[in-house]
Amino acid sequence: METNKTKWGLAGASVPIMLWTLIPIVWIVATSLKSTTALADQQQNVFGNFWPKSISWDNYSLIFTGGAKDLFVPALWHSIVVCLVATLISVVLATFCAYAIARLDFPGKKAILITALTVSFFPVIAMVTPLFNLWRILHLFDTLPGLIIPYITLTLPLSIWILSAFFQQIPWEMEQAAQVDGASSWQAFVKVVAPLAAPGVFTTAIIAFFTAWNDFVFSSNLTAARAQTVPAALNSFTGASQFTQPTGAICAAAVVVTIPVVILVLLFQRRIVAGLTSGAVKG
Amino acid sequence: MTTASLDPTGAVEASTAPPGADPETKRRARREGWKRRLPLMPAFVFVIIMTQLPFLATIFISFSNWTAFSGNKGFAGLDNFKTVFQDSDARSAVVTTIELTLLVVLISLVLGIVIALLLDRTFRGRGIVRTMMIAPFLIVPEAAALVWKHALFNVQSGLINGSITQFYNWFGLKNPPQPDWITSHPLGTIVTALVWQWTPFMMLIMLAGLQGRPMDIIEAAQVDGANTWQIFTKMTLPHMRRYIELAGLLGAIYIVQNFEYVYTITSGGQNTANLPYYIQQTFFAGTGEYGVASAAGVVVVIGTIVIATFALRTVLTVLKEES
């Protein structure tokens, strides 16, 4: 039904949009691969200063073994530990919760789901200020548990909401069918329910991890030096010397912290998109 | 994804006793019900404690005369709220928050619809293109904000000024303009960076909406001679209304809260401080006005609840329509 004219019009419209979306990303990668001299000298780059003639790993060694090592490497570990622990706890709690919601009809079920949704809209900045005082009294300020707890708060309501939507699609009759066929309820759960529920739980875990991984408000305000995660540490990056811009190091760090997310999304894209829009719209 | 109804509230009534069962079965079913409801408790208690208690603490502090400098000096009545509404910085933060949210949501929504329409057709490499279009959303927001500041808007080494120079060179023009974007358009730079990151989010919801279009009716309209534009305005847009509302409200809820872009790109300079930034600064900088910061926090929560109520209504209507 489409005329050639429409087709070319659409192609023409998509080019600027693609450029607008993608060029900054390619530029981040390009900048991270420029040596300190190439960052300042046009002659060492091609495409009008865009891509370096020779790829240099200077910026990556700067953040992993060089001057920014003490800032970046511990922060990366903190990010990984804090986000994994928080994700694990909130997904386990959310699984129980969503299982109960999906399997039971009881008064107040809708209220619980609506509370979960409302709470996930709660402005984090309003939580940071009271927590700051409380955490200092409890000696949780600038500690890993001091970040794990708020990250559970951040991810738990979201996980409950997404998992409830996933569990809704599971054909629960199969659990009973297995029991009728002589399986114990534990066997029915392990052999029938768990394999069906696993993809949903896994997707929820990825989205929860992504949410915690991206947080800046909690990590920049509830930590000082000993428990900083990557987003907060990035902010204190400086260049190789006091007078150089930290651009190269920032781009390298941005690439490093984005890679795990990109890998997860590339591997599980379909499910994640369904999860992100689930409970909200039909995926 | 082909899915059945995603309404999480429509439970499978597998565990409840059938009507007309004998009292013993009913009682057992009820006991079983409680046993099954028990797993809800840890998660629920945690969420309540962690979100409601800080909020109660915020309300409490917002009525007290408390600064980091002088300690807690007792009840302050509505003074802190008065300060929030009379302080010119706070008022400007409210205006900035509204401007920022509206601009980012509207622009990224329009772009998201356009991209979704472009991607909602079959062509070679569609999967790859779609993945690439999601990419900005995957970058850690703080890293994205820093990259925009240092690698894109930078006067000397930034991509934007570099591209301008390159274009001038290609056409043999001299003296390309090299504006200092962050100083000359502080809010514009924040909006640009945020739109870049949030467009993929809008696109995802729009794509989900487009896939739910009644294709048979659209094809019938095409047969009857409706052109592309007519189909878009008369059929696609009305169908997409709910999804547009939903994406807009969800986006608004997150962008109202945005802190890192303002903090990183302009540090709230030149009237770009939004409410989250104002709260953070009031709380942590200077004499540490805990009372005033908390009062502003209460204002943000109330504002968010208002937006969230609309969002919730939309979400629930979409769910109802789907099921």
Image: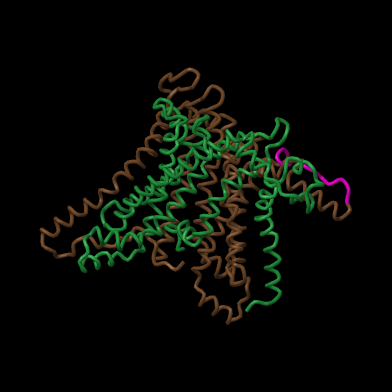
Chain colours: A green, B brown
Q: In the shown orientation, is residue B214 left or right of residue A152? A: right
Percent coordinates x, y for residue B258 in the rendering: 55, 42
Percent coordinates x, y for residue A67 in the rendering: 64, 33
For the C terminus of chain B, the quadrant is: bottom left
Q: Nearer the viewer, residue B62 or A139?
A: A139
Name the quadrant containing residue A64: top right
Q: In the shown orientation, is residue B188 left or right of residue B284? A: right
Q: Residue furthest front?
A: A65
Residues shaded magenta: B173-183
Count of marks overlaid on the render? 0
The residue positioned 36% from the left and 50% from the top of the image is A94
- Majority secondary structure of magenta residues: loop
The residue positioned 54% from the left and 55% from the top of the image is A263
Name the quadrant containing residue B314: bottom left
Say whether residue B268 is visible: no
The residue positioned 51% from the left and 60% from the top of the image is A269
Q: Is residue B53 above or below residue B203?
A: above
